[in-house]
Image: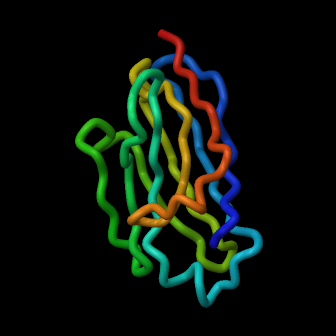
C-alpha cells in the first residue's frame, strides 16, 4: 500500500496554470520507481476518470480532453509525480487524485481540489 499525498490545487481563472504534486513519502524507492503512476480526476456528479499516466521509464498517455495542455512527469529520487496544467478550462474543475495504474483502492488519498473560474 502506498500513502499518496496530493497538493498544488487551488482557484485559478480560465487560461491559467497550476502544477500538482503527488508524493509517496512512506514508499521505498524500489517500490515507487517501477510503478506505473497516473493522475485521475472526479468532476462534480461524475465518476473518477484517468487524466494522464506515466510509466516507470517515462512513457506518457493522456486523455483526449487534456492533450496539449497537461504534462505529467515524475522524479523518482523524490518519489513524486507532477501534473503541469496549462490553459485551464472550466471543465477541468475537479478533485485530482494520483494513484498507480491500474489504481489500487487502498491507495486513494484525499486529492486536491482544482477550481477554474470562467
Percent x, y of residue 65: 28, 36
Which residue is at 69% across, 84% downward?
28
Examine the image and state in which quarter residue 89 appears: top left
* Residue 108 pos. (x, y %): 59, 54
Q: Is residue 16 above or below residue 23?
A: above
Residue 18 in the image: state x and y as whole percent: 58, 37
**Scheme by which the image is coloured:** rainbow
Q: Position of residue 48 (x, y in %)?
A: 42, 40
Q: Is residue 68 above or below residue 115?
A: below
Residue at the top extreme, as displayed: 118
Residue 110 found in image quarter: top right
- Which sits in the foreground, 15 or 1? 1
Residue extending farthest left: 64
Q: Quadrant of the N terminus?
A: bottom right
Q: Residue at x 57, y 22 (%)?
A: 115
34 up-or-down from 8: above or below: below
Which residue occupies the extreme front position in the image? 105
Asked which quadrant contains residue 56, the reply is bottom left
Q: Please state the total of marks drawn on the protein image.
A: 0
In the image: residue 82, left or right of residue 57 = right
Q: Which is nearer the eye, 81 or 94?
A: 94
Residue farthest to the right, as pictured? 26
Amino acid at each position: 500500500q502506498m500513502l499518496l499525498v496530493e497538493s498544488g490545487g487551488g482557484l485559478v481563472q480560465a487560461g491559467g496554470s497550476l502544477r500538482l504534486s503527488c508524493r509517496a513519502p512512506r514508499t521505498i524507492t524500489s517500490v515507487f520507481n517501477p510503478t506505473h503512476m497516473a493522475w485521475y480526476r472526479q468532476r462534480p456528479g461524475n465518476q473518477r476518470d484517468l487524466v494522464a499516466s506515466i510509466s516507470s521509464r517515462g512513457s506518457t498517455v493522456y486523455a483526449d480532453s487534456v492533450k496539449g495542455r497537461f504534462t505529467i512527469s515524475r522524479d523518482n529520487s523524490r518519489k513524486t509525480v507532477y501534473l503541469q496544467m496549462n490553459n485551464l478550462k472550466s471543465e477541468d474543475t475537479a478533485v485530482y487524485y494520483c494513484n498507480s495504474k491500474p489504481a489500487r483502492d487502498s491507495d486513494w488519498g484525499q486529492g486536491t481540489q482544482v477550481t477554474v473560474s470562467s
